Amino acid sequence: MSETATPAPTKVQLLELLAAIGTAQWREFAAAAAQHGLTPTQARVLAQLDGPVPMRGLAVLLVCDASNVTGIVDRLEARELVRREPDPADRRVKNVVATEAGRQVIRRVREEMQAAHGALDTLDEAESATLYALLARLRPSMEKG
Amino acid sequence: MSETATPAPTKVQLLELLAAIGTAQWREFAAAAAQHGLTPTQARVLAQLDGPVPMRGLAVLLVCDASNVTGIVDRLEARELVRREPDPADRRVKNVVATEAGRQVIRRVREEMQAAHGALDTLDEAESATLYALLARLRPSMEKG
DNA sequence: GGCGATGTTTGATGTCATCAAGTAACTCGA
DNA sequence: TCGAGTTACTTGATGACATCAAACATCGCC
């Protein structure tokens, strides 16, 4: 892997490659979601629902206005993929919980995402570890502008 | 970097890390665009306009319906960031061209994106080359589901 | 000349995003 | 304890994207 044939890429090239992979991955996610009648946003919400999450918490996770979440959850609830439960400790908050149907749907979306990425299987263990380590160094500084 | 402390990541971990970086990058792009009064979509369109591009071509690049492009270009044109020109060879097509103002705006957005990624500067040449090579192997298979 | 394919726009509709405003419930200090 | 300020959620108005169906002009070609 050293003495590589690849010349050092410019910063711009790296950014563009990252962007290309990012948009490709997003499109696949959207496509997988669409196969189950979900918009990307709805799928994203379901993906966050490991346990009960208050509306406000969803707004934080989605980085959007709280009032926006109301509509999104309304639509998910209308399809029985999600339920609003009162919070026992604070009567202001409503916790959103995925129904069994909701859990199934998001599980399938995830499976289809993974299946689509045979490319990852072409990396051996060392390569995976290297890639992961390098990407991990990129992540933190990207969190705040 | 070899004999690394990092254990081999699972496929899922890698996918999630990629997703995290992807959404972080997208948010930064959106933020940079917003600073110039552009929606992410509008900025994306401007970014494609190296030369004249027909409406239909934009729809292909954006992976969306052609009728959608009409509105997006309308709004950009209203702000003089873009111009519609008749195609000399085919009177059906209208080519979209960035105005000088449009070119300036997108150039600044790009600059801010790069500036935001000091993390990339922490990679030395070899690391950059390795990362690029590994990412490049991921890209092609992601293009079609 | 005329028929099918292509490029663009319009109109209807739905989802996502914002902001402003309203209601209910919590918190905390006087 | 009671009232002021904060917080959680919803509603309503508005705008940008996204789709589809349909209309229109133009092109390509037999």
Image (cartoon, coloured by chain):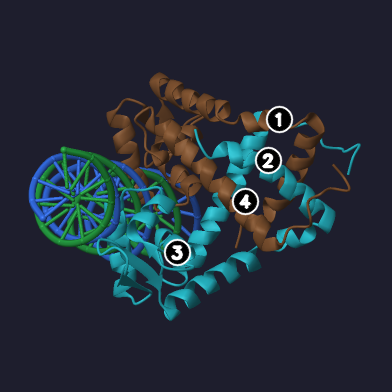
Chain colours: A cyan, B brown, C green, D blue
Say which amino acid is labelled 4: Leu
**How far is disc 1 from disc 4 in space, using C-alphas?**
19 Å
Q: Is residue A115 above or below residue B121?
A: below
SS for dot 1: helix
* Towards the viewer: A131 or B68: A131
Percent of width and height locating residue A14: 67, 36
Say which amino acid is labelled 1: Thr
SS for dot 4: helix
Say which amino acid is labelled 3: Ala
* Towards the viewer: B138 or A62: A62
Q: Are marks 3 and 1 in contact (CB under 8 Å)?
A: no
In the displayed orientation, state which residue is furthest to the bottom. A100
Pointer 2 chain: A
Q: Nearer the viewer, mark 3 or mark 1?
A: 1
Q: Are marks 1 and 2 in contact (CB under 8 Å)?
A: yes
Q: In this rendering, do the residues under marks 4 and 2 share a single chain?
A: no
Q: Dot 2 surroundings within 10 Å: few (below 14), some, or many (20 or more)? A: some
**How far is disc 3 from disc 4 in space, using C-alphas?**
17 Å
Q: Are marks 3 and 4 in contact (CB under 8 Å)?
A: no
Disc on res. A43: 3
Q: Dot 4 surroundings within 10 Å: few (below 14), some, or many (20 or more)? A: many
Percent of width and height locating residue B78: 27, 30
Percent of width and height locating residue C30: 16, 38
Q: Which part of the image, by quadrant, shows the N terminus of chain A?
A: top right
Asked if residue A77 lies left or right of residue D2, the reply is: right
The residue pinned by badge 2 equals A137
Percent of width and height locating residue B28: 49, 37
**How far is disc 3 from disc 1 in space, using C-alphas?**
35 Å
Q: Nearer the viewer, mark 2 or mark 3?
A: 2
